[in-house]
Amino acid sequence: MGRHRKPPVLKVRRGSVIALAGLVPTGLATVTGASDSNLVDALTSTVHHQFSGDTDEQLPRQEAAAMPVAAPDPVLHEAKQVVPVAPPIVKTVAQPANRERANLPAGPLGVPGIAMAAYKNAEGILAAENPECHMSWSMLAGIGRVESTHGYGGNADSQGNMIEPVYGPVLDGSLAGNNVVHDSSGGDLDGLSGPYRRAVGPMQFLPETWRKYAADATGNGISDPQNMYDAALTAGKYLCDGGLDMRNPAQQTRAILRYNNSMAYVANVMAWESAYDTGQLPKQAALPRI
C-alpha cells in the first residue's frame, strides 16, 4: 500500500472492543455525518493506552555535492507537470432501466464482486494519496457490510451504479435511536421534498457530509453516492480525515465512531473486518446489537 517503513503495531483483541460496547447504550446510532464524541478517548483508553504513535525511520541524507546534476530536459519537465483537478460534480446520475447486475467473482465470505472491486480500488487510491492512513479494503468492507450488506448484496451494474437507489430511513425521529435531521439541500441527493433528510448510497452518507468528502473514483468528473466506487472512496476519505492511522487501534476506533457513535457499531465493523481478513465468519458474540 505504499507505506513508510515502520515498526509493527500490535492489534487489539476484538474481545476488548466488544467489552467496551457495554459502556455505551445501544440506540445511540446515527448515520454518517455525526460529530466525533468527546468520550472517544475515555472509551478507548482502557484498551489502547499501551499503544503509542510510531515514528518514521529517518533515511540517511546524501551529500548534494556527490550527486551529479543532469541537464534539465524541457520535454520531461513539461510531461511531469501536474494539471490541477477540479472538484467533482456532486449528483446522482439517472441510469437507464433494465440494466444487468455486475458479474464479477465474489470475494472472501461472499463479498459481492462489484463491492470487492470498489473496496480494493479505494484501498489503492488511498495508498497513493494518503499512505499514512493505511486504509484496508477489509475495513471498508466492514463498513459496507454493516451499512447496507454491500449495497443489498451487490445490486449494481458493471460500472458500480446501483440498480435501485439505496436510501436510509427518513430521519424524522420516528425510529428509536435515530436523530432528527432537517433538510438543507433541497432533496437533490436523498430524493426527499419534505423537511427531513436520510442517508444515501451503499455507504450511507448524509448529503451534507457527502458533499464535504465527495470523491470521484471512476474519473468521470462526478461524485455519485449511488455509485459503489465513489461511495467506497468517499468513505475512505471520511475515515482517514484528520491524519488518522488505521493501524493504530485507538485512531481506528475514533474513525469508525464517526459513522455511528456506538461502541457496539465499532465492534460489528471490526468483527467483519477481521472476518474478511481471515476468511472466518465472526461469532455471534462478536456482533452485539447496535
Image (cartoon, rainbow, N blue to C red):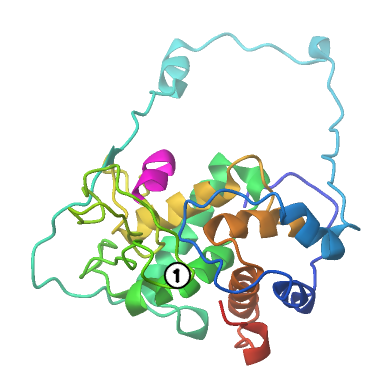
Figure quadrant of the C terminus: bottom right
In the image, farthest residue toward the bottom: 284
Q: How many callouts does the rendering have?
A: 1
Residue 217 place in picture, x, y as percent: 37, 49
Residue at the extreme left: 97
Comparing 274 with 255, the one in front is 255
| Horizontal relation, residue 116 to residue 135: left or right | left
Residue at x 20% of width, y 56% of height: 191
Secondary element type, mark 1: helix
Residue farthest right in this picture: 50
The magenta stretch spans residue 74: no
Magenta stretch containing residue 214, yes or no? yes
Task: Judge by depth and name the residue closer to the eye, 101 or 97.
Answer: 97
**Residue 31: horizontal and vertical position, in percent?**
45, 60
Residue 241 located left or right of residue 228:
right
Residue range (magenta): 207-215
**Could you tell whether 68 is left or right of 31 in the image?**
right
Rendering coords of residue 255 (x, y %): 62, 54
Q: Is residue 35 above or below residue 259?
A: above
Residue 215, placed above or below residue 259: above
Horizontal side, residue 168 vs residue 46: left or right: left
Give the amino acid at mark 1: Glu
- Magenta: predominant secondary structure element? helix
Residue 8 position within the rendered picture, expressed as x and y whole percent measured from the top left: 83, 58
User: Splitting the image into 4 quarters, where does residue 135 fall?
Assistant: bottom right
Q: Is residue 229 above or below residue 208?
A: below
